[in-house]
Image: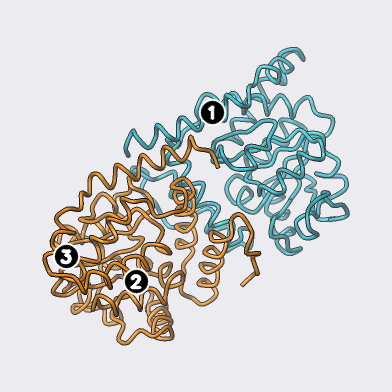
Chain colours: A orange, B cyan
Amino acid sequence: MTEIPEDHPRHDSLVTRHRIEDGVDDGITSRQGLIAQGRGEAYDYLLGEETIPSADAAERAAAAQLLTADHPVVSVNGNVAALVPDALVALAAATGADLAVNLFNRTEERVERIADHLREHGASGVLGTKADARIPGLDHERATVDSDGIYDADVVLVPLEDGDRAAALAEMGKTELVIDLNPLSRSAQAASVPIIDNVVRAVPNITAHARDLSEAENAAREECIQEFDREAALRAAEERIRGGMSGGA
Amino acid sequence: MTEIPEDHPRHDSLVTRHRIEDGVDDGITSRQGLIAQGRGEAYDYLLGEETIPSADAAERAAAAQLLTADHPVVSVNGNVAALVPDALVALAAATGADLAVNLFNRTEERVERIADHLREHGASGVLGTKADARIPGLDHERATVDSDGIYDADVVLVPLEDGDRAAALAEMGKTELVIDLNPLSRSAQAASVPIIDNVVRAVPNITAHARDLSEAENAAREECIQEFDREAALRAAEERIRGGMSGGA
């Protein structure tokens, strides 16, 4: 990785970018993933590169959903694996969720590399390699999942998901928690809990909320889920992005 | 290239994306270029994926600047070469500008590939391979240009330029015409003529204006330059992007 001075004004953004580029070297991140990273950078820049209050509320609601689920699953693609492998493992541990590799541009080799990468970072048991079930309503290569992974999940956290797939998962009746920096994206719009934040900030924050909520009463988790207002959260993110433009940079 | 149905709602955006991916296969586009493409996609989406009136005015002013310059140069990087090679050759012909390859992540091999690519698309004489001059104020690898190319230019069109380099070129006293989809970027802010538009639309439109203006009186070109208001253009683009968020998608 290229060294970036700690005091560089774009330090965090550049470190993130280099992690994604390293992901390409490791066979984890695809070209489409690099382009998606760029789109995320633009929205995050407009958002002010911080977790806004409505996103924090969404992350707490997501933690509560994962904790109260029968079978919570965290979907992992190449970008997320490259960016926050340790944080994914910590999130799975804190919530009892399974990690399932789930790729838009699926190749067996890339699935295996990502699963290996997660195991190197401490994951025990990574799903997504069996590919024995399909999400209805999608063409073959986009639809492939594990029967005991995403297919079986009642609550699924999908960071950085394609719009068609996010919609298809919602159609299956799953409670879908989506991390996406564009509040207007079809993925964000399809989510039960849209989390308009950078995965680099969102995943550790969901974990922190899960640790906190796991010690609380059941009623506290239910309240957290009931009180989350998805429309308000989407609106707040839109307004922040609009305001971010006028604020300058 | 993957085939994309003509009636796909994201047709143009996807064709552009695939051209950039092909650019990687051809050794023209870098990984950083893919990420930059993603950033551009996000801003273009918010802008409405069209040339707004203030951008059209900027493109006309840019055409007038190129036509009245002593030595106009069009800077070409990997993304622009992959996206609009024919349009670059047409622009050079219409304005008498030189094409000069100018890379942020410079390797001799990539410079040669891009020069070859432009020649395959009809360019006669591509600068940027001699690397015998430096832009002051930048570290070695970022600074390298040709003495008879960008170094010597009085007017330079830089599509998709890095902020440090855009600022350094402006410092040299050059009239800088920048194509960039983010009106808040340092490149756009450093430009004499900031063109807030997609290069895919901007480059052919500058050419069209150049053809039109080359037949006009000298006074018409001067008027076009004098009347262009860079602050108003930057503001109009910001407002459009902000409005794009509220308009939904």
Residue A67 position in % (x across, y down): 19, 71
Residue A149 falls in image quadrant: bottom left
Residue B95 position in % (x across, y down): 74, 30
Which chain is mark 1 on? B
Depth-wise, is mark 2 or mark 3 nearer the camera?
Answer: 3
Residues beneath discs 1 and 2 located on the same chain? no
Left or right: B40 with respect to A125?
right
Looking at the image, which residue is at 64% across and 49% down?
Answer: B81
Disc 3 is placed on an element classified as: helix
Q: Are marks 1 and 2 in contact (CB under 8 Å)?
A: no
Q: Are marks 2 and 3 in contact (CB under 8 Å)?
A: no
Q: Is residue B168 shown above or below A100? A: above
Residue B111 position in % (x across, y down): 73, 58
Disc 1 is placed on an element classified as: helix
Give the residue type that dot 1 points to.
Arg
The residue that mark 3 highlights is A221
Gap between marks 1 and 3 measured at Cα: 45 Å
Give the residue type that dot 3 points to.
Arg
Give the crowd class for mark 3: few <14, some 14-19, many >=20 residues within 10 Å: many
Looking at the image, which residue is at 73% across and 34% down?
Answer: B93
Circle on res. A42: none
Disc 2 is placed on an element classified as: strand
Looking at the image, which residue is at 66% across and 49% down?
Answer: B162
Circle on res. B235: 1
Residue A235 position in % (x across, y down): 29, 42
Left or right: B182 with respect to A165?
right
Gap between marks 1 and 2 measured at Cα: 40 Å
The residue that mark 2 highlights is A76
Give the residue type that dot 2 points to.
Val
